[in-house]
Image (cartoon, helix red, strand yellow):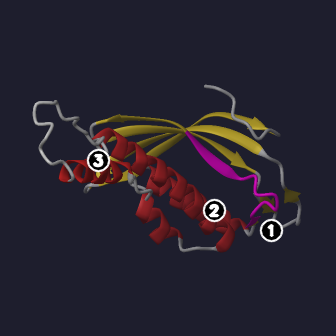
């Protein structure tokens, strides 16, 4: 977390200036210093948490597919039903297929949060996912290293005090590009 030291410096300077005052200028108006607020609004906190959740889920899901991380414990950290059940089913199908996933060598696979809309304990996160990871067919050895950009809409809910992803819908998918189409 980045620390904002500006208010402390301003407060320190204001205190030092008034401490050296001998009272000779009592009739003159003294300048006041108001430090800007460094506390986040609830909206800002929610947006920060949701952005982090989306980014962390993206990386954790890659760990499940590519590195074989435990699917159930990973999914349980980020998702609730129906997205939880759907994701576990897709992971199970992938693993049963015998296919293999590999990280793309060029580091093109990313996610970028486009927007976050929060309404109380519900939110919608729209993100552009660039997928350049490699899929190797377990039966034929055929390699699919095509790139695709998918614009997704993810519904999130506050569950037991923490944000969880509840449903994800693909809005658009563009094959062969590293840029999402607009909605």
Q: Quadrant of the N terminus?
A: bottom left
Quadrant of res 151: top right
Task: Tell me which label, 3 or 2, sits earlier in the chain.
Answer: 3
Q: Are marks 3 and 2 in contact (CB under 8 Å)?
A: no
Query: What residue lies at 21% left-to-right and 52% top-to-bottom?
Result: 20
Q: CA distance from mark 1 to mark 2?
A: 18 Å
**Eyeballing the image, is 138 above or below 173?**
below
Q: CA distance from mark 1 to mark 3?
A: 52 Å
Number of the front mark, 3 or 2: 3
- Span of residues in magenta: 101-113
Query: What residue lies at 89% left-to-right and 61% top-to-bottom?
Result: 142
Task: Tell me which label, 1 or 2, sits earlier in the chain.
Answer: 2
Nearest the eye: 50 or 135: 50
Q: Quadrant of the C terminus?
A: top right
Nearest the eye: 175 or 92: 175
Q: Is residue 16 left or right of residue 69?
A: left
The residue that disc 1 covers is 138
Answer yes or no: is residue 81 visible: no
Query: What residue lies at 46% left-to-right and 56% top-to-bottom?
Result: 85
Find residue 100 and report its horizontal and vertical position in percent.
75, 68
The residue that disc 3 covers is 39
Query: What residue lies at 41% left-to-right and 57% top-to-bottom?
Result: 3
Q: Is residue 155 left or right of residue 22?
A: right
């Amino acid at each position: 977390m980045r620390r904002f030291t500006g208010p402390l410096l301003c407060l320190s300077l204001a205190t030092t200036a008034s401490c050296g005052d001998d009272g000779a200028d009592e009739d003159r108006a003294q300048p006041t210093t108001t430090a800007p607020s460094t506390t986040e609004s609830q909206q800002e906190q929610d947006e920060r948490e949701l952005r982090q959740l989306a980014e962390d889920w993206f990386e954790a899901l890659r760990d499940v597919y590519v590195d074989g991380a435990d699917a159930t414990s990973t999914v349980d950290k980020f998702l609730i039903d129906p997205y939880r059940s759907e994701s576990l089913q897709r992971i199970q199908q992938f693993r049963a297929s015998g296919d293999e996933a590999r990280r793309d060598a060029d580091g093109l696979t990313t996610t970028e949060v486009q927007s976050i809309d929060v309404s109380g304990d519900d939110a919608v996160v729209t993100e552009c996912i660039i997928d350049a990871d490699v899929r190797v067919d377990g039966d034929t050895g055929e390699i699919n290293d095509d790139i695709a950009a998918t614009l997704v809409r993810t519904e999130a809910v506050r569950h037991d005090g923490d944000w969880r992803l509840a449903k994800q819908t693909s809005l658009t998918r563009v094959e062969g590009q590293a840029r999402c189409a607009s909605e």
